[in-house]
Image (tube, coloured by chain):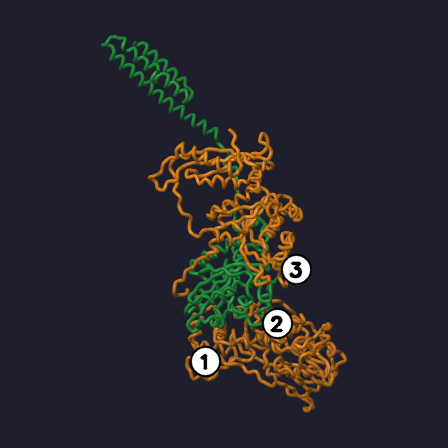
Chain colours: A orange, B green
């Protein structure tokens, strides 16, 4: 809200520069966002929090200045007694007193509509309002001054010369001052004449009864409307005005007649031969301020600073609150004025005392009490562990959007599309739904980086994903945690030791598989299986069918996927390099990873023995089967085996590949004292068994 | 015989002085002093001379052998030293050449800041708890004392998934969940992603990250809040940091403030804080005459921006690796 300092000075005494005034208001809770210069001096742009509707006027801000500085408040007295003839008064009927508890009106005749005096135009302009004509300007001026929205109707255009405050009938409509035709419904409160709505209550007047150059008589409205009624109608019509903004934040019902009188006073000052009717004030059930009990001891305790009862009384009095006599010496009975409906409990008053007394006076102390156990959550600790594993693997963490446009991943299959969780009120496709997977947004990151010349990327992300699940026959969004990695280009950019062209450490399938292997090893997860995508291509439509697999951590349903991005999708995303992806459910990882630390397995201090074998196996036998065959032997002296080479082509026959594996033999001592070296006989026996297993389980042959 | 001894000695001296490397010295040692070396060979001839001459000859052979050994050792040391110098001279590198790069992993700056916040607050006895990002309307608003259809809601434009589920607008949403299952005293913090329906620019984003911190115990006051914030801010921003309160309005605290820190000569607004609204405590059966609590919130992006001078919120979710690698 714009507050011209010169205007403010008419209502409160203070001796501060605009800067000091701004600082005082800001530290008191009315944040001055900017100080502007205008023809009439400095203008403060004040942000009023939504609970302080009482500050949406010059007088309201003046009250705060008075409370914060101790300066004297000079409120207008709000009386206006001139009426002629006294029998003439506006006819007003309220049909819905819940939504309109009070309606004040006055008819003014012999009005000449014309431009406003210069001082009025200047004031309005400084406060950010456009000048319209003398009558409209005066109603706007009083709204800015006192906070009470007002309206002037052309009295001669009101059918039956009367005002009825009622709900609209279904099918009724009104053309508002902004020229729009608006359909009304029965939830909306309107101001009507004998026939039709002439204003939407608390929001905007109708064009048909607008004050114009030909107007000679006006009916002035000053009313109190229920904040919710105004808010709902304003939202339904998508129509927000200065009036609705104030009514939503509650206008003081006690100010209705004061504002009406103030308008009359200013109209009378125009120097026209006006005739004023007697005031009408329909107020069937008076709204009273409540009384709150305040304990100064509790005030001091909650604020954490010494505050005497006298200080409390001083602060409350400065705020203009009245204290009732109290029988209990330890309690103050505070009468809350109707302009402050935001104050409902003792703590609200404690805040008022604290801010008037000054929050800068609150000292710093640390809570005393039972020591509590601090630390990260189990999940947080697990995530930190995962992140350190990925960083050690050379991956950079990214943090991408949860709200996304549908990705090619989702549209690839109808089944996936149905599981996407849409945002109900999305205005743009970019935020139209929740991500089902981290990969699409990571691909966006890869694409954006590539466009800026960053084409060697090794990225990971840990974050939430959502998908629709059938719960009791209905689709409901469920939240999951996911872990994903993306590789593209080379893991190490070309440098003087490894020039471009002689690409080393390429980000390929084995690189991303290495990340998975390392992750599972570090988490002490074993017994997982990879199932080639070619088995169930419909599960992985987003990946290259020959270069992808599903991952099952404990058998059964897949917990993740790994592989190369499908070339079709890569082309659609304009990604030229091959991209390798891994995504795995964090929930599954957490379930599969043992919580306890891995048990120590003794290491031998004796020399180990190493032997290479090179079985030839049919192409359709995967390496996993070869490894499983070796493990199936359960050889007690086999400590480790490693793949050394895979060879295909001449002189091997078609359909066969040679797999060279290095086997390491040693003993597994149970203590340092029973440690011994592995014997030649044990190695020979083990090799025989391993060969046998490979022959029977993998159809392997050995040459020589 | 004495003559042969002198000849051998002469031969050895010549060989030693002609030797150009430690390898040659090793050869010479074998040739003259080895088991079958020419000086040792002389000892075999002792048997062929008269008995009375034998001791003198033996002594003479040993004497020559010792002389030769000493010369050999001296010469070997000289040669070894010059060989080492030559090797060192030949092996010198341009030590300023760039090192061999290896794959560099890194943590996103938001995670780095979150981790630091977790570390500081954990040390102050706060337990971190995780809450859902897709939250119930009731926890996000009702449980936090938001009056139904209040203008305060206008500042919390949300992404709705259904009528009663939305993307949480504040991590504060966890407070109701915690209070429904725990009894005071407790000190809780939660950190994570929040969403508001806002147009994106350098200082606004529909997706941002926040930490929410709250505690409930006997006699918790605004001074405790200020002290806790002060200790926290000094751990995050440095020992000289000061904290100041300004009245503000949040439905879930009363009194409500926003707090700023004095950092490098400027007051910077950090977040909202206050004493937990009695309506919230009472809704969970907490006796407000005995217990009170405070709560404060802090933006993760905001914290990192202050610490590092990043001036555009959008950079965090853009993930340009040149940006990420700076931290």
User: Closer to the camera: disc 1 or disc 2?
Assistant: 1
Q: Which residue is mark 3?
A: A428
Q: Which residue is mark 1?
A: A332
User: Closer to the camera: disc 3 or disc 1?
Assistant: 3
Pointer 2 or 3: first along the chain? 2
SS class, disc 1:
strand
- Provide the chain ID for the residue under circle 3: A
Give x and y (percent) for residue A120: 67, 76
Q: Judge if badges 3 and 1 mark residues of a common chain.
A: yes
SS class, disc 2:
strand
Pointer 3 or 1: first along the chain? 1
Q: Is residue A278 rendered to the left or right of residue B258?
A: right
Q: Observer-nearest residue: B196 or A1?
A: B196
Q: Is residue B29 rendered to the left or right of residue A144?
A: left
User: Closer to the camera: disc 2 or disc 3?
Assistant: 3
Pointer 1 or 2: first along the chain? 2
Residue A4: mark in rendering: 2
Give x and y (percent) for residue B93: 50, 33
- Provide the chain ID for the residue under circle 2: A
């Amino acid at each position: 809200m714009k507050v011209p300092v010169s205007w403010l000075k008419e209502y409160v005494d203070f001796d501060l520069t605009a800067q000091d005034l701004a600082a005082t208001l800001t530290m008191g809770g009315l944040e001055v966002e900017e100080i502007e210069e205008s023809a009439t001096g400095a203008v403060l742009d004040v942000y009023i929090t939504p609970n302080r509707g009482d500050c949406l006027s010059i007088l309201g801000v003046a009250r705060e200045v008075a409370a914060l500085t101790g300066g004297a408040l000079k409120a207008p007295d709000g009386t206006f007694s001139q009426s002629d003839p006294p029998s003439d008064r506006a006819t007003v009927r309220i049909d819905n007193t819940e939504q309109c508890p009070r309606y004040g009106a006055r008819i003014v005749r012999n009005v000449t509509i014309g431009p406003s005096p210069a001082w009025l135009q200047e004031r309005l302009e400084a406060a950010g309002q456009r000048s319209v004509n003398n009558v409209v300007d005066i109603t706007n001026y009083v709204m800015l001054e006192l906070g009470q929205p007002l309206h002037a109707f052309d009295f001669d255009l009101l059918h039956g010369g009367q005002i009825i405050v009622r709900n609209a009938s279904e099918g009724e409509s009104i053309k508002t001052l902004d020229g729009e035709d608006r359909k009304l419904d029965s939830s909306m409160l309107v101001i009507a004449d004998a026939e039709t709505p002439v204003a939407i209550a608390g929001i905007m007047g109708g064009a048909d009864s607008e004050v114009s150059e030909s107007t000679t008589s006006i009916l002035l409205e000053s009313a109190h409307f229920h904040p919710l009624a105004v808010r709902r109608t304003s939202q339904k019509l998508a129509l927000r005005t200065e009036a609705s903004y104030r009514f939503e934040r509650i206008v003081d019902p006690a100010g209705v007649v004061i504002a009406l009188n103030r308008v009359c006073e200013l109209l009378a000052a125009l120097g026209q031969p006006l005739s004023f009717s007697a005031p009408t004030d329909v107020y069937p059930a008076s709204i009273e301020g409540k009384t709150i009990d305040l304990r100064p001891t509790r005030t001091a305790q909650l604020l954490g600073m010494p505050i005497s009862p006298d200080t409390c009384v001083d602060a409350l009095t400065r705020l203009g609150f009245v204290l009732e006599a109290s029988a209990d010496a330890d309690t103050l009975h505070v009468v809350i004025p109707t302009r402050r409906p935001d104050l409902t409990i003792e703590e609200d008053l404690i805040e008022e005392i604290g801010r008037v007394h000054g929050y800068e006076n609150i000292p710093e102390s640390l809570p005393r009490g039972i020591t509590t156990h601090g630390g990260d959550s189990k999940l947080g600790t697990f995530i930190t562990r995962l992140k350190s594993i990925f960083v050690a693997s050379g991956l950079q963490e990214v943090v991408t959007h949860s709200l996304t446009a549908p990705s090619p991943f989702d549209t690839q299959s109808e089944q996936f599309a149905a599981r996407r969780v849409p945002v109900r009120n999305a205005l743009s496709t970019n935020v139209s739904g929740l991500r089902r997977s981290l990969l699409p947004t990571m691909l966006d990151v890869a694409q954006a980086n590539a466009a800026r010349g960053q084409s060697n990327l090794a990225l990971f992300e840990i974050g939430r994903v959502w998908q629709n699940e059938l719960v009791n026959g209905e689709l409901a969004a469920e939240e999951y945690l996911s872990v994903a990695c993306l590789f593209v280009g080379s893991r190490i950019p070309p440098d003087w030791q490894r020039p471009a062209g002689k690409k080393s450490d390429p980000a390929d399938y084995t690189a991303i598989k290495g990340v998975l292997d390392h992750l599972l090893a570090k988490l002490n997860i074993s017994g997982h299986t990879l199932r080639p995508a070619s088995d169930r291509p419909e599960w992985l439509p987003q990946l290259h069918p020959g270069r992808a697999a599903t991952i099952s951590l404990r058998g059964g349903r897949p917990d993740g996927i790994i592989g190369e991005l499908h070339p079709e999708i890569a082309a659609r995303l304009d990604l030229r390099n091959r991209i390798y992806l891994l995504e795995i459910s964090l929930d599954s990882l957490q379930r599969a990873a043992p919580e306890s630390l891995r048990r120590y397995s003794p290491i031998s201090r004796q020399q180990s023995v190493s032997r290479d074998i090179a079985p030839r196996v049919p192409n359709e036998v995967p390496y996993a089967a070869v490894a499983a065959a070796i493990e199936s032997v359960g050889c007690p002296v086999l400590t480790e085996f490693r793949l050394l080479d895979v060879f295909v082509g001449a002189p091997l026959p078609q359909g066969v590949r040679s797999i060279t594996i290095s086997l390491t033999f040693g003993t597994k001592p149970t203590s340092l004292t029973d440690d011994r070296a592995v014997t030649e006989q044990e190695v020979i026996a083990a090799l025989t068994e391993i060969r046998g297993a490979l022959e029977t389980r993998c159809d392997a042959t050995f040459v020589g | 015989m004495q003559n042969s001894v002198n000849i051998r000695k002469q031969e050895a001296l010549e060989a030693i002085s002609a030797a150009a490397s430690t390898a040659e010295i090793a050869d010479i040692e074998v040739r003259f002093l080895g088991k079958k070396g020419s000086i040792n060979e002389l000892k075999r001839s002792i048997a062929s001379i008269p008995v009375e001459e034998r001791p003198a000859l033996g002594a003479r052979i040993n004497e020559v052998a010792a002389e030769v050994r000493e010369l050999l050792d001296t010469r070997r040391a000289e040669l070894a030293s010059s060989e080492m110098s030559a090797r060192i001279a030949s092996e010198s590198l341009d030590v300023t050449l760039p090192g061999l790069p290896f794959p560099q992993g890194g943590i996103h700056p938001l995670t780095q800041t979150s981790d630091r916040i977790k570390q500081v607050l954990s040390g102050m006895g706060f337990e971190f708890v995780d809450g859902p990002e897709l939250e119930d309307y009731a926890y996000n608003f009702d449980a936090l004392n938001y009056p139904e259809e209040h203008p305060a809601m206008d500042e919390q434009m949300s992404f709705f998934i259904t009528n009663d589920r939305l993307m949480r607008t504040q991590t504060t949403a966890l407070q109701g969940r915690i209070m429904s299952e725990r009894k005071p005293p407790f000190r809780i913090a939660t950190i994570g992603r929040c969403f508001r329906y806002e147009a994106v620019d350098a200082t606004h984003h529909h997706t941002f990250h926040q930490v929410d911190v709250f505690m409930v115990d006997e006699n918790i006051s605004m001074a405790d809040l200020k002290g806790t914030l002060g200790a926290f801010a000094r751990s995050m921003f440095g020992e000289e940091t000061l904290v100041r309160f300004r009245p503000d309005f949040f439905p879930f605290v009363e009194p409500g403030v926003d707090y700023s820190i004095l950092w490098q000569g400027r007051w910077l607004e950090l977040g909202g804080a206050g004493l937990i609204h009695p309506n919230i405590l009472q809704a969970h059966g907490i006796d407000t005459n005995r217990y009170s609590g405070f709560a404060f919130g802090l933006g993760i992006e905001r914290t990192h921006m202050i610490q590092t001078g990043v001036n555009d919120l959008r950079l965090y979710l853009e993930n340009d690796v040149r940006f990420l690698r700076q931290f």
